């Protein structure tokens, strides 16, 4: 890990952060004043600057802001890739190698964020600053632990087989709990991979600490509700039905979030930008014009039709067929699933062929990007209740019909797991859920007849990413720990 850890040191010593935090919780980060490793923790301003900087780092294209969604979609049966980027083409065609820079970048960005979160987690409890209260310290620690948990969660999804493969005993990623700072020994950070269960345990503890320390309110910074929602998702991935249903129900029952009547919260109209901060959304990346200028969400470039975007990534035939198969409910004047109207659109791909594209993320890169929506909590509660034989909050049938009702399609009379997964495919198209929905249910990532059907089977080697070659070459503890098949 020498390469990445040296990068950590530069990031903090030469990092430049100032911040403003407006009354509506939207973040603006401006590279003006330098914060050194020492001065960052000598003032409340410095500490808050480092904390706000975590969200700026998360908005990097290879952290939480888009590439992971595109990569997840093209590995599965959800999205089709026809572009010329070889690293993405290899991922789509199941030909990825350990030198693939696209799969490597999530590792790099995640550990940068984890490192700065570790600075806060280890340093803030001991700072002695006038009028900087224990409650304020707890809030900072809660935000840092939330962000550390999220990055480990993202890595656990792609560098390890899912929990269902071997009850979470397969190798995941190294757990780094201390910051790399002046005087640190590189050898102390040459760590082996921990198991998926060990990484999940850390995520669970970090999220519980965040729940205990964070307040509710706002959706562009970490909150207790966002930590509960992410924890509910992880419990679902681990088939811990009672915990998943209970946490999802708590988020639904709170007064902080609201299941919207329509899909206007996805509006791409610049004059309606605040719709992205709707109460439908539990946690949002507050992208700005600056983020757009420096790449922003990778989706804005790849997954929008030409000429505004590259036209590289569009809805698969399987997804389009699923959306077109919905029977319109009485009163639906569009006569089709409303998720085909407004939040998807016909456009030209890179070859000039008309395809159906997502219309959730615009071509500029400055739109706030929802990462968790209240709708997901209804899905989690429904699935956990169904599979666990539970009755937390409401019935699976009522929860799924609520979602179908907003989409303008007829109610179901009974609900099965296949119904829930089919509805998740349509509701969360281009939001990064499909790959894990299939893997955690022991299903192939591609449909029968697809050229990559065999390579995409549950448990197949290439369904997960290789450990980056540069990390194995630099870290003796990782040698011999490459994922099988690479």
Image: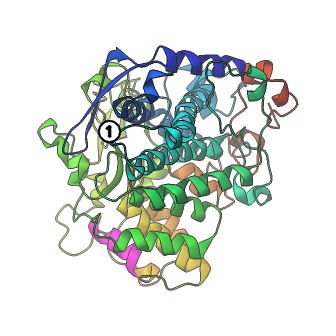
| Residue that appears at 27% across and 65% down | 258
Residue 267: image x %, image y %? 21, 45
Q: Quadrant of the N terminus?
A: top right
Q: Is disc 1 surrounded by few (<14), some (14 to 19) or many (20+) residues within 10 Å? A: many
- Which one is in front, 64 or 466? 64
Q: Residue at x 36, y 58 (%)?
A: 215
Residue at the left extreme? 271
Which residue sits at x=21%, y=40%? 268
- Which residue is identified by label 1? 361
- Residue sitting nearer the eye, 398 or 247: 247
**Per the image, is 404 magenta?**
yes
In this view of the protein, which residue sits in the foreground, 202 or 119?
119
Looking at the image, the residue that sits furthest to the right is: 480
Give the answer, above or below, for where 346 lies relative to 189. below
| Residue 458 visible in the shown view | no
Q: Position of residue 29 (x, y in %)?
A: 31, 27
Q: Could you tell me residue 40's position as x and y percent?
A: 44, 26
Instruction: Point out the stretch of residues depicted in magenta.
Output: 398-406
Quarter of the figure with residue 30:
top left
Residue 274 is a magenta residue: no
Q: Is residue 176 left or right of residue 333?
A: right
Quarter of the picture containing the C terminus is top right
């Amino acid at each position: 890990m020498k390469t990445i850890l040296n990068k950590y040191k530069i990031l903090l010593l030469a990092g430049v952060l100032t911040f403003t935090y407006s009354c509506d919780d939207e973040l603006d980060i401006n590279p003006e004043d330098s914060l050194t490793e020492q001065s960052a923790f000598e003032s409340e301003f410095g500490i808050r600057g480092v904390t706000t900087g975590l969200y700026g780092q998360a908005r990097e294209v290879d952290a939480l802001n888009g590439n992971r969604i595109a990569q997840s979609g093209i590995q599965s049966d959800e999205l089709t890739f026809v572009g010329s980027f070889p690293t993405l083409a290899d991922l789509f065609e199941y030909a990825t190698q350990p030198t693939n820079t696209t799969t490597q970048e999530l590792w790099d960005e995640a550990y940068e964020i984890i490192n700065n979160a570790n600075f806060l987690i280890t340093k803030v409890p001991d700072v002695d600053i006038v009028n900087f209260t224990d409650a304020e310290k707890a809030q900072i620690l809660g935000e840092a632990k939330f962000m550390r948990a999220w990055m480990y969660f993202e890595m656990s999804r792609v560098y390890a087989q899912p929990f269902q493969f071997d009850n979470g005993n397969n190798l995941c990623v190294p757990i780094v709990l201390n910051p790399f700072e002046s005087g640190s020994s590189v050898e102390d950070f040459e760590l082996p991979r921990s198991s998926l269960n060990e990484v999940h345990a850390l995520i669970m503890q970090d999220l519980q600490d965040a729940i205990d320390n964070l307040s509710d309110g706002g959706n562009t910074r970490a909150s207790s509700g966002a930590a509960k929602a992410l924890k509910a998702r992880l419990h679902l991935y681990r088939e811990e039905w009672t915990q998943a249903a209970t946490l999802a129900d708590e988020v639904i029952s709170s007064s902080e979030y609201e299941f919207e009547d329509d899909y206007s919260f996805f509006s791409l109209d610049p004059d309606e930008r605040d719709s992205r901060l709707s109460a439908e959304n539990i946690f949002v990346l507050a992208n700005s014009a600056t983020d757009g200028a420096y790449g922003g969400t990778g989706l804005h470039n790849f997954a929008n039709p030409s000429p505004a975007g590259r036209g590289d990534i569009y809805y698969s035939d399987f997804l389009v067929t699923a959306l077109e198969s919905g029977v319109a409910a009485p009163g639906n004047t569009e006569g089709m699933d409303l998720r085909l109207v407004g939040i998807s659109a016909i456009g030209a791909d890179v070859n000039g062929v008309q395809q159906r594209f997502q219309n959730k993320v615009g071509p500029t890169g400055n739109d706030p990007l929802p990462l968790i929506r209240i709708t997901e909590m209804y899905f989690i509660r429904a699935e956990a209740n169904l599979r666990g034989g539970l009755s937390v909050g409401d019935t699976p049938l009522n929860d799924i019909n609520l979602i179908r009702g907003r989409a303008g399609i007829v109610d179901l009379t009974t609900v099965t797991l296949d119904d829930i997964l089919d509805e998740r495919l349509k509701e969360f198209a281009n939001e990064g859920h499909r790959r894990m929905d299939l893997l955690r249910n022991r299903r192939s990532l591609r449909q029968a007849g697809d050229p990559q059907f065999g390579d995409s089977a549950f448990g197949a080697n290439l369904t997960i990413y290789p450990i980056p070659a540069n990390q194995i070459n630099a870290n003796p503890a990782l040698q011999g720990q490459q994922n099988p098949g690479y």
